[in-house]
Every structure is written in structure tokens, then in C-alpha cells.
Image: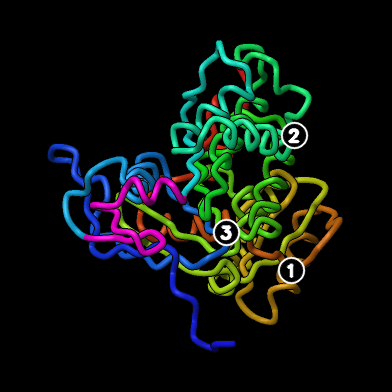
Amino acid sequence: MSDEPESPIITTKLLNKMYGSHLAIDGINLEIPRGAIGILGPNGAGKSTLFKCLLGLITTTSGEGTVLGHDIRTEGESIRSKIGYMPEYNALDPNLFAVDQVRYAGELLGMNSKTATQRAHEVLEYVGLKDQRYRKIETFSTGMLQATKLACALVHDPEILICDEPTNGLDQRARSFMLQTLKRTVVEGERSVLMSSHVMDDVQEVCDSIVMIHKGKIVLQGYFDDFAEQVDKEIEVVIWGGASKMEEELATEGLEARRLGRVIRIKVESESTVDKILNAAVRAEVQVRQMKEYEPDLEDIFLLVMEKLGSEIKGSSELMTPEHTGES
């Protein structure tokens, strides 16, 4: 068995894409390994444009790139035969039965009708729509529509699956099933998944490495665990009583804190930080119900990077629109 590192499945070098005078992606250099990769960035960062360039759906302005060894500038058809793409937008035909929609997707990718029909039944069962195969798309819930889009992306058994906002509009049950299905696709199906999402928890649940894009540039690329070590250590306390007064007293102690309701996270400055927190609690006359070391998550990393870049980005909950949450 060779000890040589496995070649990346996707590479780009100085990749640029302009729309008129707008530079949508700017000098992107990528080396994406096999596995599950989260593509992160605020609205308009260039995530969807990057996906379309990798698929050969749009012409790049300059630079180069490969997907599974195929040139993105000249071999788009070969790339698309090996990639499943689940777009953010809905391109399903409301008048078709689910099985016909997925079969049609397979035929568009060059599969003969018999093979495409067989695969349509298989992937619809895989995404949890076995009993809805002969229902019309127009009768489907948002969760069923997203599952159908995933089935269309998987029908030709691709090596790479690209999902653009796969949990858009899903309730908690449908979201959980979608994420579990994507994880199965990586672990059991031995495929690679590139996943873009506004929901950091979703990306963290499925992916082990991330690429962060800001204003068309790559600002972070690597494994989540490596980045987590770079985030300032914090102590999380749950209090009962005057949270505002507690914040004031923490500031008096010279501690940097961020508050989320009754939960306050305090940056660890020294070994005396815990004593200072307790002193502040006594003066604020609040009860400390819980105190523990806080484990940073993907959202912490995202916000830290955006803060360093000077971007006016808030938490992912504030990036969410009714379209993403399924609320009307």
C-alpha cells in the first residue's frame, strides 16, 4: 500500500470570474481532498459562482482548475457526468411524478431509459421517498422537494456531490434526515460531498474540513479541528438574576464577555479568570447555575474570521431568511 498522499479531487489556480465589472471570484487557489467539505461565506461571497465554474456551467475569466483530473475550462461534460449537483433553486417540473423527474435527470446525463428508471427507484428509496414515487411534484412539501433534488443529483452514482443550501426551508425532522443522508453518502457511499449552507451547525455535523470565501477570495481553508485551536478559550456561565449587572461587573474586572440571554461567555485571560468571574457574580448578586469551559464551534470560527476581515456579519441565525427556515 502506497504511503503517498492522495491527490486532491478539486484544484484551482488563480481562478477568476467577472460579471461585467464585478469580480465574483478573485484569484481562488484550492486543493480539496476527498471527504466532506463545507463551503462557507456570507451572501454574495461567490460560493454559487464557484460551484458553477467547477461544473463547467459558466466560463471562467482567467485561471485554471481541475475536477477529478478534468479541465473545468474544456471538459465540463465529463465533469458533470461524475458530479451530482443539488442547486439552491428549484428546477423540478411540478407536473411530473417523482420517479419520472429523477429518471429524466438520469437521461439528461446520458443514461438509457431502463437504467435511469431503475436508478430512480433506488435513489428515491435512499432519500426516503419510496412511498411517494408516484406522486406529482406539485403535491410535495419543501422537505420532499429537497429530497427529490438530492435524488436527481445522485441518480447517476456520482463520485462527488455538490449541495448548495441543502437544508433550505426544512423543519427540524426533515433537516435531520437530510444531514444523516448526506453523512451516509460520504461514509457508506464513499463519495465526496461539497456542501454550502448558512447553517453552521449543519456544516459542522456533515463536514470535517472547510473552505471560507469572502468577497470572492479564499480566506480560510483546512480542517475544522485545526481552526478550533485558534479560537480564544472561553468560560461559559449560566446565571440567574441580573445579566446586565453581571456584564458590568465583568467589565470592571477587566474581562471580555459576550452575552446570549442568561448565558455569558468570558474570554480566559489568565489563571485568575475563574476567581474574577465569581467575584463579579457576588457583586452583581446573581446565582451561577453552571460554569464550564466552552468548546468553540464552526460559527465561532466563522465570526472570528469575518470580524478580522471587518465584515458586518452577525450570527448565522441572523443570516437566515424565511426561505431558509421554512417560516412564512
Question: Which residue matches tag 2?
Answer: 128
Q: Nearer the viewer, mark 1 or mark 3?
A: 3
Q: In which quarter of the image is the C terminus?
A: top right
Mark nearer the N terminus (2 vs 1): 2
Q: Which of the numbered marks, if any, corresponds to residue 80?
A: none
State whether residue 168 appears in this view. Answer: no
| Residue 70 is a magenta residue | yes
Q: Describe the element under mark 1 as helix, strand or loop.
A: strand
Distance CA(mark 2)–CA(mark 3): 21 Å
**Which is more toward the observer, 322 or 29?**
29
User: Where the N terminus falls, by quadrant?
Assistant: bottom right
Q: Is residue 150 magenta?
A: no
Q: Which mark is residue 293?
A: 1
Above or below, comparing residue 323 to residue 109 in the picture: above
Name the residue type under label 1.
Glu
Cα distance between the residues tagged 1 and 3:
28 Å
Question: Could you tell me the amino acid type at mark 2?
Answer: Gly
The residue most toward the left is 21
Occupied quadrant, residue 98: top right
Point out residue 155 in the picture as x, y percentages from the top left corner.
57, 39
Q: How many labels does the image show?
A: 3
Range drawn in magenta: 64-82
Where 320 falls versus 40 (above or below)? above
For image coordinates 66% across by 12% down, the residue present is 139
Q: Mark 3 points at which residue?
A: 36
Question: Splitting the image into 4 quarters, where does residue 297 fall?
Answer: bottom right
Q: Is residue 123 left or right of residue 212?
A: right
The structure residue drawn at horizontal position 59% and vertical position 22%, both measured from the top left corner, is 100
Mark yes or no: residue 43 visible: yes
| SS at mark 2 in the image | loop
Report the Cα–Cα distance between label 2 and label 1.
39 Å
